[in-house]
Amino acid sequence: MTGATWGHPVGPTVAKRAMRCERRKSSSAALNTQQILDSTIHMEDTAASTGTTIGGYTITRIEPLARLEGRYLELEHRGTGARHIHIECPDDNNAFAVFFSTPPVDSTGAAHILEHVVLAGSRKYPVRDPFFSMTRRSLATFMNALTGADWTMYLYSTRNAKDYKNLLDVYLDATFFPRLDEDSFKQEGIRFEFENPDDPQSGLRYKGVVFNEMKGALATASSAVDRAIGKTLFQGLPYAYVSGGDPEDIPDLTWESLKAFHARHYHPSNARFYTYGNQALDRTLEAIETNALAKFERISVADGRIQNVARATRPMRAVEAYPASGSEDNTKKAQALTAWVTVQSADSFQSLAMKVLAEVLLSNAGSPLRKALIDSGLGSALADGSGLQDD
């Protein structure tokens, strides 16, 4: 399970757990219109405006979305401060996501390993792996969990009303009330094993799902580029670390520190919820409040805003090694890049301008900068990571 969030090694290194479930086709030809309607979630007409309350929530913003034939709503839970965004539209492929701000302070991969461990059983669902159990039973059109450079997200979508309700219950219980047992930490994170399982006299080696995953993910030139750029250009920020975990640092993570990380970050006051589709919003909010938010009180959380990068006043140089292949000629495997910090990612106009500029300069063989670099003879191809990295 790799990728950018593991799988796309660009910009600050990030990690994801990829699990996609395709919507199942019904084998029954006897479904009639009423059966289909009964299994589909419908949007209810509600008169809403800023300041309107829905259960324990208050609407703080509402905007029309003409192109989607719907509305954009922002809400805040009065008890915990949890924020919620809802896109109301006629689409019956209803979606849910919960985000937590999880900026790393080192490269032990706490956020990534926690993403795995919370899906390994919870208070209401103490089975070994309820997430993957649901993939065999659910009608979901999508299920996933992602660890980014400074956030973690759990999401799904489905066209079936009962399935939506079931998945919501599983996701809420997994994220807010996971078992976090030590065996799951060792399985998903890091543990010792004998090199020969049948010989207790053999040497010990590290193993673990995330540990092994990251060994592969970071054993490429592109990941070495990412690490070097992150450590050099983003010193003091979360992007200087490998949020997915560096195999050299993962062994420093303990079970106790993982539980502390969950207690610190997986709280409604640090959560952002997102829903989309034609489901009745009040029912979803009630389920979220009943099954999760009502069991917490508001706490003070650290300001989630990331400081602006301190721009260097002089050029900096970094060298990052990556594993060589014993079966290939490695004499021409080195890469060289020059990188700059550009515009703030929150500035949509400047970001768009930079994307257009990168396309003009590098997108194809005839682009001026790309052609000049190749024609110079300095190398045989563009280095990994060339272009604009905006994530």
Image: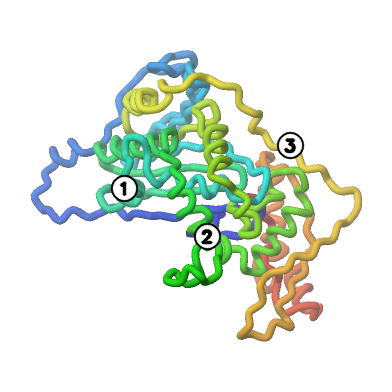
The residue closer to the viewer here, 329 or 11, is: 329
Q: Is residue 43 left or right of residue 75?
A: left
Q: Badge 2 local density, few (<14 within 10 Å), some, or many (20+)?
A: few
Residue 245: quarter of image: bottom right
Residue 101: quarter of image: top right
- The x, y position of residue 88, in whole percent, is 40, 31
Foreground disc of the pair 2, 3: 2
Tag 2–tag 3 contact (CB < 8 Å) = no
Earlier in the chain: of badge 2 and badge 3, it is 2
Q: CA distance from mark 2 to mark 1?
A: 37 Å
Tag 2–tag 1 contact (CB < 8 Å) = no
Q: Is residue 336 left or right of residue 279?
A: right
The residue closer to the viewer here, 47 or 248, is: 248
* Residue occupying image coordinates x 57% and y 32%: 264
Which amino acid type corresponds to the residue marked 3 in the rendered image? Gln
Can residue 91 be seen from the camera position used here? no
* Residue occupying image coordinates x 72% and y 63%: 361
* Residue occupying image coordinates x 53% and y 33%: 263
Disc 1 secondary structure class: loop
Residue occupied by mark 1? 140
Disc 2 secondary structure class: strand
Q: CA distance from mark 3 to mark 1?
A: 38 Å
The residue closer to the viewer here, 7 or 299, is: 299
Can residue 203 be seen from the camera position used here? yes
For the view shown, which residue lies furthest in the left direction? Answer: 30
- The x, y position of residue 371, in whole percent, is 74, 73
For residue 307, the mark is: 3
The residue closer to the viewer here, 81 or 372, is: 81
Residue occupied by mark 2? 192
